[in-house]
Amino acid sequence: MFMDEATKNALDFQYILNQIEVLTPYGSLLKKRMKPYLRGSEEDLKDQLHMIESYLPFIKNNNIRREFNNLLSHLKDLRQSTKRAMEGFILQDVELFEIKNFLFLLRNLKTQMEKENIPSFKETRIELIPKLEKMLDPEDTKIATFYIYDAYSEEIREIRKRKKERDNFIRTQKKRIKDQVKEDLNLDLRPDNSVVVSRENKSLLKTIKIYPYLTYLSETYLNIKFTIIPTDEISAAEREWDLLRDKEEQEEMRIREFLSKEVGKRRRELYRNMLSIGKLDLLLAKTKLAIDLDGVKPEIGNEHSIWIKDGRHPKIENLLKKREMNFTPITLHLKEGVACITGANMGGKTISLKLVGLLSVMAHYGMYVPASEMKLGLSHYIKSSIGDMQSTDSGLSTFGGEVRVVSDAIERADEQGIILIDELARGTNPEEGYAISKAIAKYLIDKPAITLLTTHYDNVADLKGIQHLQVVGLSELKIEELEDEIIGGDGMEIINKHMDYRLRKVDKTTAIPRDAINIAKIMGLKKEILTLAEEILTNSQCTDHNSQLKTNE
């Protein structure tokens, strides 16, 4: 498995999937079946990204995009009808209509692509089925409706001709009778050849009783309804019309059976086009997403590493935009082994972790990524431990949940994958948490997995071979210049405004930033407490320094 459900949720990958707006049932099916390109399938992934790159200039054109949307949105799911035809069932008129419409849309789609010189690839090639198209449109009407045309057989033509003659004869004879009734009784018959007479008009009722062209039909307490008496000629013509209708239905059934068999014979061609349309639909949706995210094509290499320049997390960026705030792009370079991000809470460590994971997953799934540059070597898996790992189902504590997830990741550490761990061992006491964190980091240093972890234990990153990344945070902020802003201001808004989420590479000599102290000041903690905290921190650092000197001696 490349990615489990917990990792998918933690990285907000479903948010990205929701932005891929396919328009056809075939595109929806392929979207659900999307799989990542794993290590070893670099060339296939490059081909996928190349196709998106080829479609970009066309989908940026709103007119072309609208044309595609219009055509694709009218395509219906014909898989079941095609399967029924293949299995020998006789298709209904509505099914034959939808297949005919599908063939017309294929032609229009192919014409549109040729007109705009839009690239066609093997995976998205539209192949017309002119013989089936002609069978469903024998009179070459070019109209996307279906009817059992007279052109299908001489017999159906003759039956309909005779039916029409009988129908005209019946209508003519009934009109003659209606005109006679009008002349004799001054009564206007309804279109259904009936007439309603009031019970109070007794003289007229007496006349109608012996009148040769009208007969009783029904009555109410106020009126009596009559209808015309068909002549022997009319009755004979109606019986013949009924027989012709039965013959017409039988012949239409025979024609539908023939057409259904022809559809079944061409099932492979139909299914190939459905697949091509699904792939085209999904590719166009990915292309649109690339435009909407202002994304860049990730460069796929053989070296197992991750390079991101000015990366952005789309979901978080969108949330910040709604608050009229900007996302600070993040740049970093990760190789096999361990990289550690440190910094105060609220400093963006988790966001950096999720960003690396999300952009990596997007690239593995053949998408453009929201960054100015990205280079990536494919992995076999990605595993994360982000958020509250507490499990009420199994009764595990937060720490227990963390250990289980991290243990699962470590089991695959000898494979080239990506491991993301947020605030390792935060769910237990600091002394043991530090020891476990450092032990896990030390174990993973020489593994072929790319491990990125965040921690509030700064000394975890002091191990040789670990890349130490530090969130700039509020370390460069001159807190005294914000006193007027802090007084009466919204602490959270101030922090978000001035927090610098960029990462910088540091070493043992780099001073530990006092972001927590600055955050506490902005949030309004009493000055007396802040002063005591700074004294305690200074004394603690001096003690640690002296202990280190003694150890070195």
Image (spheres, rainbow, N blue to C red):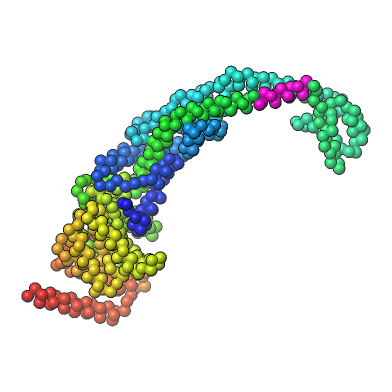
Displayed quadrant of residue 422: bottom left
* Extreme residue in the left direction: 553
Where is residue 362 drawn, in percent x and y? Answer: 32, 49
Is residue 7 rendered to the left or right of residue 550?
A: right
Q: Residue sitting at 32 percent across and 68 percent down?
A: 400
Viewer-closest of 526 and 313: 313
**Helix, strand or loop: magenta stretch:** helix
Q: Is residue 55 left or right of residue 178?
A: left
The residue at the point 38 percent across, 50 percent down is: 17
Residue 144 seen by the camera: no
Circle count: 0
Q: Is residue 540 left or right of residue 70?
A: left
Q: Nearer the viewer, residue 402 or 534?
A: 402
Q: Is residue 240 magenta?
A: yes
Where is residue 111 shown, x and y percent of the image?
Answer: 41, 29
Highlighted range, magenta: 233-246
**Image position of 29 with respect to 272: above or below:** below
Q: Nearer the viewer, residue 404 or 451?
A: 404
Residue 506 highlighted magenta (yes or no): no
Q: Residue at x 63, y 25 (%)?
A: 248
- On screen, residue 274 above or below 438: above
Q: Position of residue 262 (x, y in %)?
A: 48, 27
Nearer to me, 437 or 376: 437
Q: Position of residue 542 (x, y in %)?
A: 16, 77
